[in-house]
Amino acid sequence: MSQYLSLFQQLGPQAFSDAVAQVAPYFGTIEPQFTALRTGHAELLIRNQRKVHNHIGTVHAIALCNGAELAAGVCTDVSIPPGARWLPVAMSVQYLAKARTDIRVVTEAADVAWSTPGNLEVPVAAYDSEGTKVFSAVITMNVKH
């Protein structure tokens, strides 16, 4: 079992979220709150707060990218075979609507061929509190066995 999945199950969502921000401090800038984690799936919340806003008072595009990379990375970690390693190598994003509320970032990647080494495309979507998709991304993860 992945170390991250084990920690999520042992610590619970809040303590796990805090621990991830300690391992990779930059992710702490968005104060992510993981809500779900399993093979092929990760979900976290970015709260709508001033420190993640842009000049027009909405959640900044790079805060959304930060959440997407975190969700995709942790999802990749819990989904690849034991002993495999991963590294993000590319990100393609689309900003679809203004992010004016708390944002739910979801990696739903059950269809990714996790046991295949090489570049894997991990999809991520972000939704506002009304369920409107405000952002989508594909993060390419290079997986080595």
Image (spheres, rainbow, N blue to C red):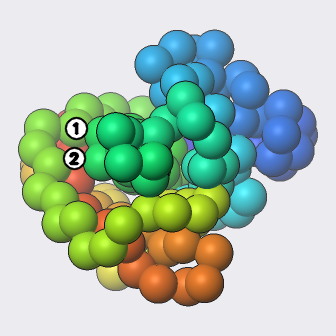
Residue 111 vs 117, above or below: the answer is below
Q: Can residue 83 be seen at all in this image of the molecule?
A: yes
Percent x, y of residue 65: 32, 46
Quarter of the picture holding the C terminus: top left
Number of numbered discs visible in the structure rendering? 2
Q: Residue at x 51, y 63 (%)?
A: 100
- Compared to residue 128, the image places residue 4 above or below, namely above
Q: Looking at the image, which residue is at 32% across and 33% down?
A: 85
Is the residue marked by circle 1 packed among few (<14), some (14-19), or many (20+) residues within 10 Å?
Answer: some
User: In the rendered image, which quarter is residue 21 located in?
Assistant: top right
Q: Amino acid at mark 1?
A: Pro
Q: Which is more N-terminal, label 2 or label 1?
A: 1
Residue occupied by mark 2: 141
Residue 90 placement, left or right of 135 = left
Query: Where's residue 61, x and y in %?
Result: 30, 48
Q: In the displayed orientation, state which residue is furthest to the front.
A: 56
Rendering coords of residue 7 (x, y %): 76, 36
Relative to 57, 85 lies left or right: left
Query: Could you say whether the residue bearing mark 1 is in a helix, strand or loop?
Result: strand
Query: Where does the image place residue 125, in percent across and percent down from the top left?
Result: 38, 70
What mark, if any, has residue 65 been given in the picture? none
Disc on res. 88: 1
Query: Is residue 14 toward the left or the right of residue 77 in the image?
Result: right
* Label pair 1/2, CB-CB below 8 angstroms: yes
Instruction: Identify the secondary structure beneath mark 2.
Output: strand
